[in-house]
Amino acid sequence: MIQRTHDATLINRVLNDPAVFKWVSAPGIDRLDFSDLAADPMNYLLTNEHGGFMCVPRGNGTYEVHTQFLPSIGGRAVWAAREAARFMFTETDCTKLTSYVPLGNHRARRLVEAMGFDMTGRDGSWTYPSGETVPLDWYELTKDEWKCQQQQ
C-alpha cells in the first residue's frame, strides 16, 4: 500500500541502492538525500516497502513525479503507480502529473506508458553517472484522462 511520509529513510536507501542510483544520479554525486524534499509539506513522498514517488508542485495543480523503486518491485510497479495517481488526484489539488524519462531508462518508460501518460515532447538532457548524456522525453497525465481510465 502506498502511504505519504515525511521520513526519507526508506527512499534514501532506495535512491542509493546501486541498481537505482545509476538511473537517478548524475556525475560527481556520491550520495542522494531526499530528506529536505520529504520534509517540505508542499511535496508528496508516497512510498511502499520497495520505494516510491516524489511529487513536487510546479504550479497550477501540476506536480512533477520522480519514481524510485528497487528491482524487487517487479510487475507491481504499475499497481503502486496507480495507487499514487489515485492519491494525488483525489487527496490533493493535483490536476496534472508530469514526468521525464531519460533515453535508455526502459523501466521508467514502460511505467509511464502503462499508466497512460502521453508523451508531450523531447526537451533537455540528462547525464548518467557514467558520463553519458541523453535526451529527456517528457510525459503527462491529466486528472481528466485518469478519470476516463478509471471507467474502463
Image (cartoon, helix red, strand yellow):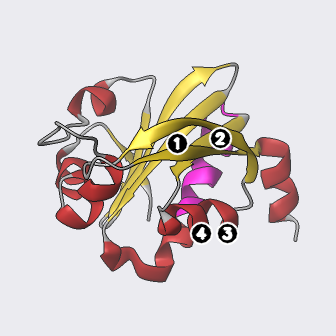
- Label 2 residue SS: strand
Q: Closer to the N terminus: mark 4 or mark 1?
A: 1
Give, as a three-letter code, the residue at label 4: Arg
Q: Is residue 84 magenta?
A: yes
Q: Nearer the viewer, mark 3 or mark 4?
A: 4
Gap in angstroms between the C-alphas marked 3 and 4:
6 Å
Q: Closer to the N terminus: mark 3 or mark 1?
A: 1
Question: Looking at the image, is 93 positioned above or below residue 147?
Answer: above
Q: Closer to the N terminus: mark 2 or mark 4?
A: 2
The quadrant of the picture occupied by the N terminus is bottom left
Give, as a three-letter code, the residue at label 3: Ala
User: Which numbered disc covers residue 110?
Assistant: 4
| Foreground residue among 1 and 77 | 77
Gap in angstroms between the C-alphas marked 2 and 3:
14 Å
* Disc 2 target residue: 97
* Disc 3 target residue: 114
Label 3–label 4 contact, CB within 8 A: yes
* Disc 1 target residue: 65
- Residue 135 appears left or right of 15: right
Give, as a three-letter code, the residue at label 2: Leu
Is the residue marked by circle 2 packed among few (<14), some (14-19), or many (20+) residues within 10 Å?
A: many
